[in-house]
Image (tube, coloured by chain):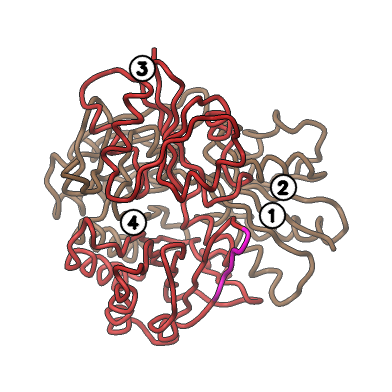
Chain colours: A red, B brown
Amino acid sequence: MSKLYVVGIGPGSREDMTLRADRALGAAEVIIGYGVYVELIRGFYPGKEYITTPMTEETKRCRIALDTAASGKAAALVCSGDSAVYGMAALVLSLRGECDSPEVEVIPGVTAALGGGALLGAPLTHDFAVISLSDRLTAWDKIERRIEAAARADFTIVLYNPQSRTRPDTLKKACRTLLSLLPADRVCGIARNVGRADESARILTLSELETAETDMFCTVFIGNSETKIINERMITPRGYKDV
Amino acid sequence: MSKLYVVGIGPGSREDMTLRADRALGAAEVIIGYGVYVELIRGFYPGKEYITTPMTEETKRCRIALDTAASGKAAALVCSGDSAVYGMAALVLSLRGECDSPEVEVIPGVTAALGGGALLGAPLTHDFAVISLSDRLTAWDKIERRIEAAARADFTIVLYNPQSRTRPDTLKKACRTLLSLLPADRVCGIARNVGRADESARILTLSELETAETDMFCTVFIGNSETKIINERMITPRGYKDV
């Protein structure tokens, strides 16, 4: 039976891909994805046919992937990080609907919250909430309501898509909401380009975060009430004997 | 310089480990961990020295790992899923404190929310909250407050450690809180033993979840208001043209 692999490629380096993802991409004849992510892996898997579509053409991208697999070719649709977290797995499964063909295998991957967290230290040891600041597909009111709820309930918060050229103010707006609920010196972190040549991690306060420059390659972390800095790493304790 | 790898081994199968985790364990002389997790990987890496400590001896486990690395042996401390999410990375970094030795490398991994999500379909396409129901280290009041906040703000919710022999009622209690805020037919899912020989996925309603049997090998998913079942998979849409 024809099969489509929907592959989470992790943060960016081949070594942070899973063995299952690596094997699926090695076996694929055609690899489909958003241009930026395809460029991350093209060098690892030469000799493949690559098909890219731009942002806003997610539906077309998924249809190409389904059609390629249905035509009998070994096909893999790649997503950065995990294949479901703000990724394409749900759209692929929705477009396929009640058909059983092609078979779809969702291959999970290290999402930016985990890859970025490891680079910063261990900010996600306790309960956490993941929120995208992109208001392209979600009303800002709903995003803001989630930020407020997560801050009030003392979750560590991970913000995806903090800012982009078309949304220069979304992180600032989120920080103003957070600053109305949390102390200005709350420990925060920014992980950028995780697993790529110029990866970087920065630890800063919530008030510093309000004016920090970020972009679509950044993931932002807001600590909970117990998060601290130890030896330049961002650490959220679990509660084992108070460490 | 001596170095300790804190390794997230993913849900359980070797193929869902990252290449970096696999390489670190292959190179280790001593592998330290909780017994259940060590048993998952012992067969993959024969000829190593394995050291296990039981639950409640997390501090001892981390000290052994730090001391082993400091003695000059290649040491790896394993955690199931990710190395930070309810894992040991924060405790290791806290216990090392302001010392620079041994060097600590946190290797992220596929946490149960991602591995279990892929098995169920794609429940985590939109914002989500991860909450542990274990009240061993966290007061139940705080857990309940987080469940309420996440439900009110329409997060998809992932519950870790839903139930155990010593906590037979925690998932029931959580479901009663959720049922006071969400419809009884809200789409939910249970993933069990992900990546292991007897892995299983079950999709059910929130009212069915209240009486479902789970254990410490289960991860529980509560969909958001848009989560649906398509072809027996649990799907949370992102909003691309309403799919």
Q: Is residue B220 left or right of residue A50?
A: left
What distance separates the C-alpha of mark 4 from that of mark 2? 30 Å
Residue to which mark 4 is pinned: B129
| Closer to the eye: label 1 or 4 | 4
Q: Is residue B161 left or right of residue B196?
A: left
Looking at the image, is mark 4 or mark 2 earlier in the sequence?
2
Q: Are the residues flagged by discs 4 and 2 from a single subunit? A: yes
- Spot occupied by residue A191 in the image (x, y as percentages of width and height): 52, 66
Q: Chain of mark 1?
A: B
Q: Is residue A85 above or below residue A241?
A: above
The amino acid at mark 1 is Arg
Which residue appears at 47% of the width and 56% of the height? A112
Q: Label 4: few (<14), some or many (≥20) within 10 Å? A: many
List the residue tagged with mark 2: B32
- In the image, which is nearer the foreground, mark 4 or mark 2? 4
* Subunit that carries the residue with mark 2: B
Whether marks 3 and 4 lie on the same chain: no
Image quarter for residue B151?
bottom left
- Going by the numbered disc 3, the residue's amino acid type is Ser
Q: CA distance from mark 3 to mark 4?
A: 38 Å
Highlighted range, magenta: A197-202
Callout 3: SS:
loop
Q: Secondary structure at mark 1?
A: helix
| Side (left or right) of B194 relative to B97 | left
Q: Secondary structure at mark 4?
A: strand
Instruction: Please tell me the numbered disc located at residue B61.
Output: 1
Q: Is residue A155 above or below residue A111?
A: below
